[in-house]
Amino acid sequence: MPPGSLPPSLSGVALPSEEWSAQAETPIRQTASVSFYSADEKSHRAVTRTYLRYRGATFKAILDENGGAGMGFDLLRLVLAILILLTHCSWLVGTSGVLTSILNSIFHLNPENVSRLAHATTTIDNDPTVHQLTGLGRPITLSYLPMFFALSGFLVAGSALRTRRLIPFLGLRVLRLLPALFVEVTLSAIILGAIFTDLPLSHYYTEPTFWSYFLNIIGDVHFHLPGVFTNSTTDVVNSNLWTLPWEFQCYVVMSLMIITGILYHRMALAILFGAATLALIYASFVYGFEVVPAQVGGPTLVYYFVTGVLMFLWREKIVFHEVLFLIAAAACYVLMMSAKMVFIYPVLLTYITVFIGLFPFPRFSLLKSGDYSYGIYLYGFPVTQALLAGFAILHKNLAVAAPLAVLATGAFAALSWHGIEKHCLKLKRYIAPKSAKISKTLHPAAFSG
């Protein structure tokens, strides 16, 4: 058996009478005792067996076994979207951070002391896109967006290699991003803004700020609507929109890779990436480039995207193993404590991201029915703002506000997926049949029609 390859399993499904052991290249015959385990225990044992079979295999082997899809990618996206929602909810509610609030509630500690143990979230110069992070929780909270972009780079590289042409690639990006974004921006401007503005509607709908808000659809970010949320922690309608221009820039970078052909010459791309990394490390240490005490900046997110692209291109050389994962996690935690290390640890954090994405998590019914992460990311901030503006009792009460925000946002995300996103994504079969097949594999309930 070639090093790093998966054991034979008939297209990834073990025979009913036997399974593969990762420790020995001999089949292990199942016994009747399996029938005595509950459904949950069987699921846990199945995950363990699959993981042991994956251990030591390459990223490529695992992807190939699953038809080009990782079983954990949807779950990871969903969890990251919810964590970002909770972080913003904590800031808007007026508490010192999710981890801080939990510790304070459990141990009844002074918030100032707890903030040194966890992370504290405050605004800097009234900029809604910048959150100060300190304490032991900094590496965790700081990793959310970089993991999103690294994951995007890894998956989008696969999409680009499957299409191998610019127009189909861009068509897939448009189908995934723009329809849901168009609806969210329109709903925020026309309905949410009209409900919460302190201006007469005749003035609200004629204000230039109202009309400029629609430019968010094409990546020209505008945070404010006239007279909306003026009495809240911030009058920003949707802070999450700040990443849109950088996401679009990632697709511009990928388009250039396709046009120039460097996407298909991974050694040349790796050399350029290494040279750029050395230059960026020098710039960060000497000139403070992208060295901020808060969340990662836009250019760094693009860097993470390219890191994800490279990890996909070299996927048959990278081994899936928990020891590498733990080493990367420990190193990342230490390095991310320092803002100057911003270009030192991205490869490690990207490995962590892809490892989680390839982990054989059980396929929950919720994940089979759709990908709700994009909807949660789009609607999380404005829905939380609306809840806090409508119910003053939620201020300083994260224990109540957070679950309500998650449930309300989840409802909007479900409507977005089932009402808009999945119908647009069904058009993928006309642009890229291979990508459409992967979507159907991941979300059979959504694409069965």
Image (cartoon, grey):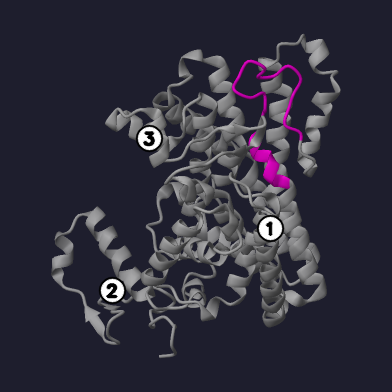
Q: Which residues are magenta?
A: 222-244
| Mark closer to the chain start, 1 or 2 | 2
The label nearer to you, 2 versus 3, is 3
- The residue singled out by tag 3 in the image is 114
The label number, if any, that marks residue 16 in the structure image:
2
- The residue singled out by tag 1 in the image is 302
Q: Nearer the viewer, residue 374 or 292?
A: 292
* Residue type pointed to by label 3: Val
Question: Does the stretch in magenta take in 224?
Answer: yes
Tell me how far mark 3 sits from mark 1, CA to CA.
33 Å
Rendering coords of residue 166 (x, y %): 79, 66
Residue neighbourhood size for the residue with mark 2, other residues' Cα within 10 Å, grouped as few (<14), some (14–19), many (≥20): few
* Residue type pointed to by label 2: Pro
Rendering coords of residue 79 (x, y %): 47, 47
The label nearer to you, 3 versus 1, is 3
Tell me how far mark 2 sits from mark 3, CA to CA.
52 Å
Tell me how far mark 1 sits from mark 2, CA to CA.
45 Å
* Residue type pointed to by label 1: Val
